[in-house]
Image (cartoon, grey):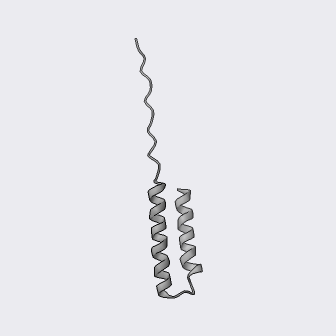
Amino acid sequence: MGGAVLLGVTVLKLFLIDLSNRGGSERIVVFIAVGVLMLGVGYFAPMPPPAVASKPKEATS
């Protein structure tokens, strides 16, 4: 979850601060490039599977 928050903050900073003085076509290209990079990150580093509770051992008689 921490990585997702950092990615979101970075993308927000990119669009609000770094691209604030750029033209419309440059913003579109950067938006598409960042989207492709985020898809790549999501493909290669998916969320971990949910933890499975371990079953208590049954006593054998």
Q: Percent position (x, y) of residue 31?
A: 47, 76
Tell me what residue is drawn at x 49 percent, y 82 percent: 27
Give the vertical position of 31 relative to 50 (above or below). Answer: below
Q: How many marks?
A: 0
Tell me what residue is drawn at x 46 percent, y 59 percent: 42
Tell me what residue is drawn at x 56 percent, y 79 percent: 16
Give the vertical position of 58 relative to 1 (above or below). Answer: above
The residue lying toward the viewer, choosing from 24 and 44, is 44
The answer to which image quadrant residue 18 occupies is bottom right
Tell me what residue is drawn at x 44 percent, y 64 percent: 39
Q: Percent position (x, y) of residue 52?
A: 44, 39
Q: Percent position (x, y) of residue 47?
A: 46, 52
Relative horizontal placement of residue 39, taking residue 15 as reference (left or right): left
Quadrant in the picture for the C terminus: top left
The residue lying toward the viewer, choosing from 15 and 34, is 34
Give the vertical position of 42 relative to 31 (above or below). Answer: above
